Amino acid sequence: MAKETVIQGVVLKDGSPVASGYARLLDEGGDFTAEVPLSATGQFRFFARPGSWTVRALVPGASGERKVVARQGEPVDAEIEVAA
Amino acid sequence: MSRANALVDAAWVEAHLNDPKVVLVEVDEDVSAYDKGHIRGAVRLDWKSELQDPVIRDFVNKEQFEKLLSGKGISNDETVVLYGGNNNWFAAYAYWYFKLYGHAEVRLLDGGRKKWELDSRELTEELPNRPATQYVAKDARTDIRAFRDEVVSAIGSRNLVDVRSPDEFAGRLLAPAHLPQEQSQRAGHIPTAKNIPWAKAANEDGTFKSNEELTALYAEAGVDLSQDTIAYCRIGERSAHTWFALHELLDLPNVKNYDGSWTEYGSLVGVPIEKDA
């Protein structure tokens, strides 16, 4: 069974955390793996196997994404800026 | 069934918010989502505590379902419109359930809660007041639900569509990456199953892909849509989403959801399993 690591972070619009929206975890091929609603302070957290991922954020009227590399035992912290 | 009779969009829901013959029902995995705001007039259904038998692993029976819906104030002659989080997984599961117990008019809100939120449509914390009814269910249908022996006998003879993620299909994970890793005894998939993750049937905003896109998706994955099909996942909710796409949107006649899914199959003694090396 694959060991998992953590990919977490916050979604920002104009530099401030967004209050509602969704974060999607896409694999190296761009395929959907998981989705979570953002917390009231714009935060998200995924458990995923080590590797290259894209976190894509959807909020009302805007979206954004960021590539991350997750390594075993090293949680990834990512800030994602969204724009219309 | 057809797309027009199974799916409604947000504009339709907004136009029917005050329609006395339409009842909105929110079904979430995270049952607290409803408390943070729901579509006006919507009642909540808890997929676990209300739709599952509390003791044995099974659905609530016909009498329990009647009592549940009567208590929610839902009548037989109302159109039930389901929506929820997780791209409508649990709403699709509840849709299948309503169909199983013979409710006449059931719809799914395309895009579910996510699209409604992303479109910045109104949510309220106000609770609906629906007087109790005398709901009467029909006997549970058996033509849309698959059980384990039927699944085993379908290996190599019918389409088996595994809608879990590639990592679960390959046996590298036992549950989706963002959920607790509830355990079956073994990891892998049912031999001859094709892996078409549920999400491939949906757009980014949670709406279903067009019928043309859906047909191409399953055909390209090697599913012969002229044959009977059984869909499964881990506990039967993601596969209810795919069942909805195949049976309700594409209008294919013999499609069943195997709600026992991998948590049952992966714990059976002696059944064949495939996994990636």
Image (tube, grey):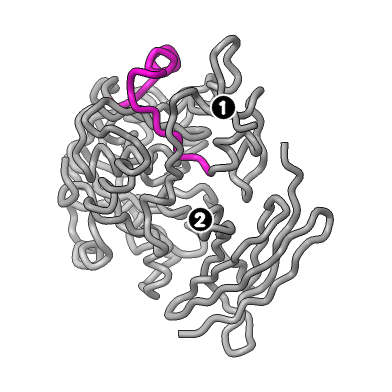
Q: Amino acid at mark 2?
A: Phe
Q: Chain of mark 1?
A: B
> Is residue B71 in sight in this rendering?
no
Q: Residues within 10 Å of mark 2 (few under 14, many from 20)?
A: many
On what subunit does the disc labeled 2 rest? A
Answer whether residue B58 is magenta in the image. no
Who's the residue at 73% across and 53% down the image?
A50
* Region in magenta: B144-165
Q: Residues within 10 Å of mark 1 (few under 14, many from 20)?
A: many
Q: Percent position (x, y) of residue B91? A: 38, 46
Which residue position is annotated with label 2? A32
Report the residue at 30% width, 44% height from top. B245
Q: Which secondary structure lies at badge 1?
A: helix
Q: Position of residue B31 (x, y in %)?
A: 52, 50
Query: Which of B239 and B221 lies nearest the eye of the viewer?
Result: B221
Picture layout, residue A60 above or below residue B148: below
Q: Outermost residue toward the right? A: A73
The residue identified by callout 1 is: B263
Give SS at disc 2. strand
| Quadrant housing the N terminus of chain B | top left
> What amino acid is at disc 1?
Thr
Tell me whether marks 2 and 1 sit on the same chain: no
Q: Compared to B213, does B266 lie above or below?
A: above
